[in-house]
Amino acid sequence: MRAALNRAGLHFYSYRENISQKFMTMKKKNIYLILLIVFAASIAAIIYNYSVKNKTKNPETYAFLPRTGEAAKSPEWQKVKEDSYTLFQKLKAEPNDSKSLASLATMYIREARVTANYAYYDKAALATINKALQINPQDFEALTLQSLVYLSQHHFQDGLSIAEKAKAINPYNSFVYGLCVDGNVETGNYKDAVANADQMLSIRPDMRSYARASYLREIYGDYPGAVRAMQMAVEAGSPGDEGTEWSRVELGQLFENTGDMQNAKMHYAIALERRPGYPYALAGLARIAASEKNYGMAMNYYTQADSAVTDFKIKEGMVDLYNEMGEPAKAIALEKKIIEAMTNEAQSANNDQNIGHYVDKELAYAYLKINDYDNALSHALLEYNRRPDNIDVNECVAWVYYSKGDYEKALPYIKVALKTNSKNPVLLCRAGLIYAKAGEKALAKTVLQEGLQKNANIETILRNQSTTTLQSL
């Protein structure tokens, strides 16, 4: 028994010792495992911190995409490639060089204007600008560029707020007052826009300030003054420069609105000569050709312009031309493609402010062209809720209600649209038609006469409706 107990005891102690050894072995394994996990976590943390720091020092860079068509052959494009290479090398050596970051962002913004590839270059510009603002949140130049991109994306209130912040930092800079002009115009603060334009002109009378003065004069119904100011803008710029030829095209549009087709045509032709393949000059010539019933030439101009840039206004011109040519099926098919593209862009804007534009006003008009009044109203009201004081937005809402047959609902919006005494012929014709349907015949007659008297280059359907209504009053 004792021997048995001793054997049992030996077995017990042997078992306990075995357990102890196993426990110790397991404990060591666990310790090793824990140490391994801690070590791995430490390495991951180091890698993460390095990655964050490295990303901060070396933000994502965006290459300049190859241009197409005539723009690819220009000396300007060669200079863009050379200058961008120099900036990339500078930033590689010194990632926190704020001046180089601002220069690179400016190049992205200019390239967006030239190519109309805003989705890509806006994102590139904002990534670069945000890097500069990480270094110095009060960087005046970076703030002005950020404001400029937001205004371009139709994020008008954001753009205006940033511009006001920048103006407080440096109240003696002409450019920042221009941004305040744009933001105030688009949000409907016209008196503030005029005050900022006056200040801009007093600091630096140049192409930018003259162009803004022209736009404000147009808004307030002074077409002769608007023409003179835009002529000064053109003369202040360098021939062939994108900004100069943009101003020349805007001058042509002013002549179209006042019925001077010969001067309009001349300025579009000059812009095209000075800047070969310029899509907005081509679009202007397309409108003139369409007004002359030369539809083949008009479509040729539009096709060239459309192949150079992706711009919804150019495509909308093609839709109008198809309707003029008596090809409604083609017009509707193209309009649906435009709506799909704009909807995708609007969705991008809702998801990521760095990517997309707000295009609800444009979508409202697009839906009207396919007689989808519910969607047109939905988008018009979305835009109205963002900027209820803007005259163009009020005109859009009024025209949607008119198209739906809700004439009384259209009235208050069209009255707001006319609050600056604008003489835009499209606005006046629409207002006259609304007043006529709402029973205000005397007012309708006066407004329609004013809208039609200069024989401006407006859509044929609107002109015919306005002429017929005027004759019936």
Image (spheres, rainbow, N blue to C red):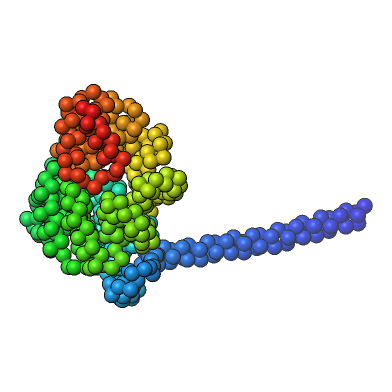
Q: Residue at x 29, y 43 (%)?
A: 460
Image x and y of residue 49, in percent: 43, 63
Q: Residue furthest left?
A: 202
Q: Residue furthest right?
A: 1
Which image quarter holds the C terminus?
top left
Q: Quadrant of residue 459?
A: top left
Q: Is residue 208 left or right of residue 14?
A: left
Q: Is residue 170 visible?
A: no
Image x and y of residue 327, in percent: 42, 47
Whether 411 is drawn above or below 155: the answer is above
Q: Residue at x 18, y 56 (%)?
A: 262
Image x and y of residue 306, in percent: 37, 58
Q: Residue at x 73, y 62 (%)?
A: 21
Toward the viewer: 30 or 259? 259
Image x and y of residue 106, in percent: 27, 64
Whether 462 is drawn above or below 411: the answer is below
Q: Is residue 27 left or right of residue 246?
A: right
Give the number of callouts: 0
Q: Residue at x 36, y 62 (%)?
A: 304
Q: Quadrant of residue 11?
A: bottom right
Whether 349 is drawn above or below 411: the answer is below
Toward the viewer: 171 or 386? 386
Q: Is residue 310 visible?
A: yes
Q: Is residue 136 left or right of residue 363?
A: left
Q: Is residue 42 left or right of residue 184?
A: right
